[in-house]
């Protein structure tokens, strides 16, 4: 039995050499699902629903999977049945979507390493509470004040940035720019000639590698719309659910 493990960044999915359209092998299909699964709890937002998605899960459709793997529907169904029998996947299918759970996801991700990462983030979170509402002085010298990843975390996790971009995108930003070589040395952000946090965050949000920024904006839009609907229906003889469906349908028509 093979032992040991390697780290594979999700950016490998964007590699032009590796993402060429081709017929996937079962091994490639399972690795693709591993890379696409949520690495932390999140939400899947539709026009009318907000569905919780746990770590190691993803929501998609069989049509999308067939297109990605370049498989027929029969081959995909056989693959899903086999992976369930092998206790590799847990599959829940409806007429609208397919909800996949990677069995033993934590084991694949190395639970010991994950616990260390979680502990470190919790420590950074606790350190942020006392500084969230404070203004950062001397903005021009921000880069010089970033000595380690905790400093970067504190600067990035300002309340205004959390409101605008959401915590998931900001944590991804910190993980990327706070990375150091295995043999030690400077963080990635410290090697840059200039590192303007607002500008870098704006660029990161535009690229939106894992869709965290879009999901955050969708949640904000949904919350705003729900609030407006609540105000409209207050003390009036209007069906809230009916109004929500009407607004959703109208939004979809406008989007199309």
Image (spheres, rainbow, N blue to C red):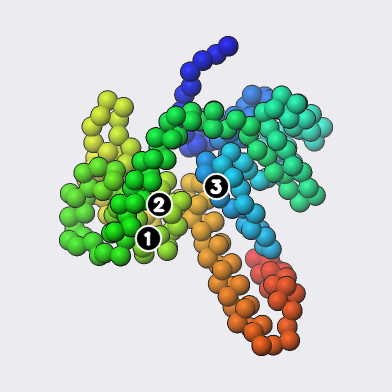
Q: Is residue 185 above or below residue 190?
A: above
Location of the N terminus (image quadrant): top right
- Residue displayed at 48% across by 30% down: 111
Mark 3 Cα-neighbour bin, 10 Å: few <14, some 14–19, many ≥20: few
Tell me if I can see residue 134 in this picture.
Answer: yes
Q: Earlier in the sequence, mark 1 or mark 3?
A: 3
Q: Nearer the viewer, residue 236 or 38?
A: 236
Q: CA distance from mark 3 to mark 2?
A: 15 Å
- Asked if the residue under mark 1 is in contact with the one under mark 2, i.e. CB atoms within 8 Å, the reply is yes
Q: Is residue 12 left or right of residue 26?
A: left
Q: Quadrant of residue 81?
A: top right
Q: Nearer the viewer, residue 30 or 209?
A: 30
Tell me if I can see residue 199 in this picture.
Answer: no
Tell me the tag on residue 176: none
- Residue displayed at 62% across by 41% down: 57
Q: Position of residue 22 (x, y in %)?
A: 65, 29
- Asked if the residue under mark 2 is in contact with the one under mark 3, i.e. CB atoms within 8 Å, the reply is no
Mark 1 Cα-neighbour bin, 10 Å: few <14, some 14–19, many ≥20: some
- Residue displayed at 26% across by 64% down: 134
Q: Position of residue 145 (x, y in %)?
A: 19, 50
Q: Which residue is mark 2?
A: 170
Q: Is residue 11 above or below residue 170?
A: above
Q: Is residue 205 above or below residue 222?
A: above
Q: Is residue 81 left or right of residue 33?
A: right
- Residue displayed at 69% across by 44% down: 99
Q: Earlier in the sequence, mark 3 or mark 2?
A: 3
Q: Which residue is mark 3?
A: 41
Secondary structure category for the residue under label 3: loop
Secondary structure category for the residue under label 2: helix
Q: Which residue is mark 1?
A: 161
């Amino acid at each position: 039995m093979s032992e040991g493990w390697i780290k594979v960044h999700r950016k490998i999915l964007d590699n032009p050499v590796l993402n060429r359209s081709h017929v996937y092998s079962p091994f490639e299909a399972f690795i693709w699902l591993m890379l696409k699964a949520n690495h932390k709890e999140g939400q899947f937002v539709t026009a009318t629903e907000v569905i919780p998605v746990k770590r190691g899960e993803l929501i998609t459709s069989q049509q999308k999977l067939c297109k990605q793997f370049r498989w027929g529907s029969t081959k995909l169904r056989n693959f899903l049945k086999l992976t369930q029998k092998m206790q590799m996947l847990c599959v829940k299918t409806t007429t609208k979507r397919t909800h996949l759970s990677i069995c033993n996801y934590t084991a694949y991700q190395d639970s010991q390493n994950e616990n260390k990462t979680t502990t470190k983030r919790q420590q950074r979170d606790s350190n942020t509470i006392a500084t969230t509402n404070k203004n950062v002085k001397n903005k021009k010298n921000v880069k010089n004040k970033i000595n380690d990843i905790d400093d970067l975390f504190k600067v990035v996790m300002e309340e205004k940035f959390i409101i605008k971009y959401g915590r998931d995108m900001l944590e991804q930003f910190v993980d990327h720019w706070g990375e150091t070589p295995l043999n030690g040395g400077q963080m990635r952000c410290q090697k840059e000639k200039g590192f303007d946090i607002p500008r870098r965050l704006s660029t990161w949000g535009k690229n939106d590698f894992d869709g965290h920024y879009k999901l955050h904006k969708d949640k904000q839009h949904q919350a705003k719309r729900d609030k407006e609907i609540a105000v409209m229906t207050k003390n009036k003889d209007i069906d809230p659910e009916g109004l929500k469906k009407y607004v959703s349908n109208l939004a979809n028509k406008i989007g199309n």
